[in-house]
């Protein structure tokens, strides 16, 4: 019989860990400010509604409250350093576009910008949000989808996955930066 107590580390109520479970990283753009999220998910099919979780201590949270829309951009693994830099800097302190060398373009249906190097882009109109103690869950109705035709099939794309604590991987080998 397995000795559960010696095999697993337990956290008390309120304890939190990413658990090193890989999640696709998305770069959300609100207005002209990009920021990263690893906690996001589709929540409805018709209409297509997508949710993102934003830390309430971040500048991006303030912008999300003020804005009526946002874009969700899924960059490939080739953009690991740029995405990591976006996640570790604050838009009210530095110009993330200059810092990373990434470019942005005007969206087709919303006022927030999009990142043209992305594999998939969702243009979203903000519907509502739910406040929690340290994060806020924002819901957006996807009003336009963009994707690179023929590049999203398994084996043809390398998604950027976040494991927590500065560990990233793709469908290949984990890499720490």
Image (tube, rainbow, N blue to C red):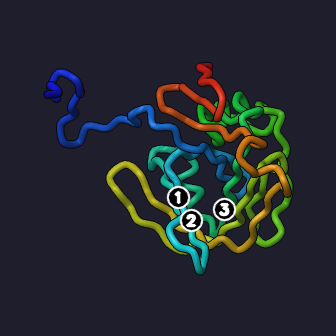
Depth check, mark 3 against mark 2: the one in front is: 2
**Spatial CA span between label 1 and label 3:** 15 Å
- Looking at the picture, how far across and down is residue 8, in whole percent? 23, 27
- Callout 2–callout 1 Cβ contact below 8 Å: yes
Crowd tier of the residue under label 2, counting other residues whose Cα lies within 10 Å: few below 14, some 14–19, many 20 or above: many
Residue 40, position in %: x, y? 52, 54
Question: Which residue is at a point 59% across and 31% down the rendered structure image?
Answer: 88
Residue 19 appears in view: yes
- From the top left corner, tell me how far across and down residue 139 is, in percent: 53, 67
Q: Earlier in the sequence, mark 1 or mark 3?
A: 1
Q: Secondary structure at mark 3?
A: strand
Tell me: 42 left or right of 109.
Answer: left
Mark whose residue sits in front, 1 or 3:
1
Indicate which disc, 3 or 2, sits on the residue closer to the N terminus: 2
Sequence-wise, which precedes: disc 2 or disc 1? 1
The residue where tag 2 is placed is 50
Q: Residue furthest bottom?
A: 46
Q: Position of residue 161 (x, y in %)?
A: 59, 37
**Distance between the Cα atoms at labels 3 and 2?**
11 Å
* Residue at image mark 1: 41
Q: Which residue is mark 3?
A: 70
Secondary structure of the residue carrying numbered label 2: strand
Q: Is residue 97 left or right of residue 61?
A: right
Q: Secondary structure at mark 1?
A: strand
Q: CA distance from mark 2 to mark 1?
A: 6 Å
């Amino acid at each position: 019989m397995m000795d559960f107590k010696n095999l697993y580390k337990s956290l008390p109520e309120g304890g939190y860990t990413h658990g090193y479970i890989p999640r696709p990283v998305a770069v959300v753009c609100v207005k002209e400010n990009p920021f990263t999220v690893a906690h996001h998910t589709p929540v409805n099919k018709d209409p297509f509604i997508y949710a993102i979780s934003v830390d309430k201590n971040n500048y991006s949270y303030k912008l999300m409250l003020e804005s009526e829309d946002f874009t969700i951009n899924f960059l490939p693994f080739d953009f690991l350093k740029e995405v990591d830099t976006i996640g570790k800097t604050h838009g009210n302190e530095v110009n993330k576009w200059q810092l990373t060398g990434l470019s942005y373009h005007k969206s087709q249906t919303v006022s927030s910008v999009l990142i043209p190097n992305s594999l998939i882009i969702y243009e979203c109109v903000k519907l509502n949000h739910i406040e929690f103690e340290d994060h806020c869950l924002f819901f957006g109705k996807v009003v336009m989808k963009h994707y690179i035709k023929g590049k999203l099939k398994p084996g043809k794309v390398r998604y950027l996955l976040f494991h927590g604590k500065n560990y990233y991987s793709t469908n290949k080998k984990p890499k720490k930066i």
